[in-house]
Amino acid sequence: MSPRTPGPSASGAGRPLPARLDPRAGRSGSSRSRSRHQAVDGPEQEGPAPRRRTGRAATVARAVAGVLSVVLLAGSGWGWYLGQVAEATVNRTDAIPDSGNDGTGAAPEAMNLLLVGNDSRADLSEEQLAELNAGADSGINTDTMILVHIPADGSRASFVSFPRDSYVQIPGYGWDKLNAAYAYGYADTPESASVEERQAGGAQLLVQTISGLTGLQIDHYAEVDLLGFFNLSSVVGGVEVNLCEPVDDSRWSGAVFPAGVQTISGADALEFVRQRHGLPRGDFDRIVRQQVFIAGVLRKMLSDDVLLDLGKQRELVEAASQSLTIDQSLDLFDLAERMQSVTAGSIEFQTIPYVGDDEDEQGRYILRLEDEDTLHDFFAELSAEREAPAEDAAPEAPETVAPSAVTVDVYNGSGVTGLAAEAAGALESAGFVVGGTGNADSTDYERTVVRHAPGDEAMAAALAGAIPGAVVEVSDDATSGTVHLVLGSDFTEVGQAVTPPAPEEPAEGEDARTAADTTCIN
């Protein structure tokens, strides 16, 4: 097959849309009722021509962008039209196996989609390899594997990255690196089979491996290629990224970028997501870059620049679908409709939980993941349907009382001598009644605490209002009618307490972030 050249998304020219898909020719009927194996622009065929897929690390952005492109006006005639454009150009493969893909989920209507970037460069010409600084073909190992979970209500999307060196059980082959699964499946398919059938064999074994690793059933599969990623990043007008430090990886990936916020596209975008040499955490930082770039593309997809530009929408759909190979049953239009309520803040990215670096029996570098039970629990939690908060009436605010109606016993838990007496004087000046002062049971209190007996909520609220940042607690030790103030090391004076930062919630996986997060990365 001759090398593929950029489609209309890059050059303004490309394959013409079939007559029945051209809005100027009217609609003769939706092709959505046809078999997924039948081409939209021609008679029924046995299947797409054999084709080796190309791809690279973060190229999964195109899959998501193609899906979300259809979302923009999914309920209108234009949305229907975009769906037909995608169906006319997307490639399909038999990626979902009949066995070895078992799992559980809280809701059968939810979807688990495996996004894969293949490392082959077979479809690139010498000129394209040079332009994209892609280097030599490294075979058919998969460099990018991301599981996307979309709940039944389409309220969010969770992206979990799988490092390529993850040491896992590959069905029929034992323990090996995760990125070898596709290659094993490809090689295990009879040599007499077509290239397309061998690619399907690779995809099926990878799906079985991910299913066993996560405890989930993989519903759909999408594989992406290098050239389409280059086109897409150009079509969206570049993606904004933020680097904490400047980088110079001219020897390997070609990535040379200053620190700070910048917009990248085309070859620069490819270099950005491919770099791992010279980064503090190597492949882990590259995974974060993949996630950040996908997030940037998604933010562009949800921006007014795209929402209000029908021509841009079509360009994006074309660029995405031409670079995609998806399983036989994935309906892009249906997937788009599922995700209409997704926002940047509800798109979550993280990396599968792992233990750390190691070597296998052959002395190769591997990444040890958490044990099977921990991983299955992690993915079960990820796929659990989250209940919407109850729409009960807001609780009534406690009755407010004047400071003169509040008696306070002050206890010094800060370790600073004389602080209780000082605070007592300030409270009296503010109108509170001080019952007594003393030392707390410990001098190691980091937070200032207001303690009260049940029923004294109003008095505790009045005192806490004069000491911003104080923690309010119900205490059996507090006497009804008197509020206890325990001074911590954060206390300075009444009305000017230092408010400590809220504790960070532990991430479920590594490097957790959302598509709305624009903080700097390595």
Image (cartoon, grey):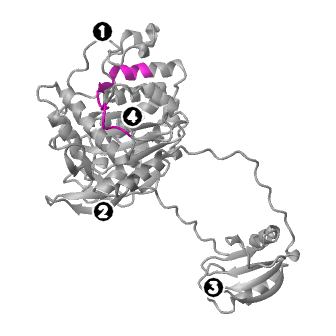
> Whole-Å distance between the Cαs marked 3 and 4?
56 Å
> Whole-Å distance between the Cαs marked 1 and 3?
81 Å
Q: Nearer the viewer, mark 4 or mark 1?
A: 4
- In this view, the residue farthest toward the bottom is 417
Residue displayed at 45% across by 25% down = 333
The N terminus: image quadrant? top left
> Whole-Å distance between the Cαs marked 2 and 4?
30 Å
Looking at the rendering, which quadrant does residue 264 occupy?
A: top left
Which residue position holds label 1?
43
Image check: 160 left or right of 305?
Answer: left
Q: Is residue 120 visible?
A: no
Up-down: is 365 above or below 516?
below
Image check: 174 left or right of 335?
Answer: left
Most foreground residue, 371 or 225: 371
Q: Nearer the viewer, mark 3 or mark 4?
A: 4
Q: Is residue 388 visible?
A: yes
For marks 3 and 4 on the same chain, the one whose residue lies earlier in the sequence: 4
For marks 2 and 3 on the same chain, the one whose residue lies earlier in the sequence: 2
Q: Nearer the viewer, mark 2 or mark 1?
A: 2
For marks 2 and 1 on the same chain, the one whose residue lies earlier in the sequence: 1
Confirm whether the magenta stretch covers residue 205. Answer: no
Instruction: Identify the disc placed on residue 414.
Output: 3
Q: Nearer the viewer, mark 2 or mark 4?
A: 4
Which residue position holds label 4?
219
Q: Position of residue 146 (x, y in %)?
A: 35, 44
For marks 4 and 1 on the same chain, the one whose residue lies earlier in the sequence: 1
